[in-house]
Image: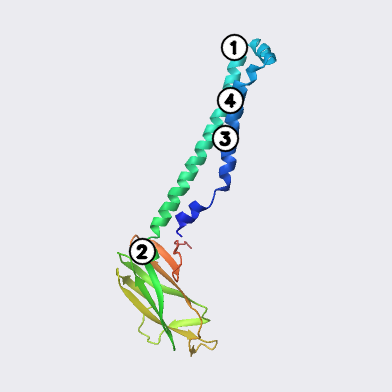
Amino acid sequence: MSDLEEWLSKPDPRLSTVRDTAFAVIAVCELLVITWPATPRALSWLGSQSAVWWGAVGTWVGAFATTAAVVAALWIAGRDSRVRQAERADRDKAQARLLVAVMANRGEFVTVRIENHSAAPLFDVALTHVEPALAWRLGPSTVQRPSQDVLKAGEHFQRNIELLGANGEPQRVPDVEYSFTFEFVDSAGLRWSRRDNTEPQRVLATTG
């Protein structure tokens, strides 16, 4: 489920409160205008009021109605803004979701294959975490670079990973499930982190 679908599926707890408040204010105003003058006592009392008083009543009723309209309009505008933000975040993740990690081998070392299933290149693709490994390093070949500068559309690359024991020496890969986290930059210049094939997360630049 995408972020947009997940967000839209969750009811906003403020919706019923804002809506009920707005409708209640409008209903009270209409009730005052329509039903109050209908009683004989009210008619007699209201008939003795001056035009200035009636003008003040009209202003008061109008203020309540305006407040209710403003509250409703602000809520609608806020919700529309959140929907647009969720839609944009969903679009931003479109390419990042198409970087796929597959464990290709298990033995003296783990081989993980990274595949770009998108229609555009990915950049600076780097392995950042291997779990639940105590420690790890790229190997057994020392010529492997930790990152792939450019991963073209439809292509893949592999990295061999040596798992290290408490003494820092390579150990045989235990028969457990492993998780791999990669960071990369998409074709729009946005940096992402993705753990296995879960939803990618934005990596925002930090200033020291």
Is residue 43 shown left or right of residue 168?
right
Residue 185 vertical position relative to residue 41 in the rendered view, above or below: below
Sequence-wise, the earlier of marks 3 and 4 is 3
First of labels 1, 4 by sequence position:
4
Q: Report which residue position mark 2 lands on.
A: 186
Q: Which residue is mark 1?
A: 51
The amino acid type of the residue labelled 3 equals: Ala
- In terms of secondary structure, where does tag 4 sit? helix
Q: Amino acid at mark 2?
A: Asp
Residue 166's disc is none
Left/right of residue 46 with respect to residue 163 in the rendered view: right
130 or 68, nearer to the observer? 68
Location of residue 61 by image quarter: top right
Q: Residues within 10 Å of mark 2 (few under 14, many from 20)?
A: many
What SS does tag 1 mark?
helix
Dot 4: within a 10 Å radius of its alpha carbon, few (fewer than 14), some, or many (20 or more) residues? some
- Distance between mark 1 and mark 2 Cα atoms: 69 Å
Report the residue at 49% width, 51% height from top.
8
> How much space separates mark 2 and mark 4, taking CA atoms?
56 Å
Query: Which label is found at residue 30?
Result: 4
Q: Nearer the viewer, mark 3 or mark 2?
A: 3
Residue identifier under label 3: 22
Q: CA distance from mark 3 to mark 2?
A: 45 Å
Q: Earlier in the sequence, mark 1 or mark 2?
A: 1
* Disc 3 from disc 4: Cα separation: 13 Å
Q: Amino acid at mark 1?
A: Ala
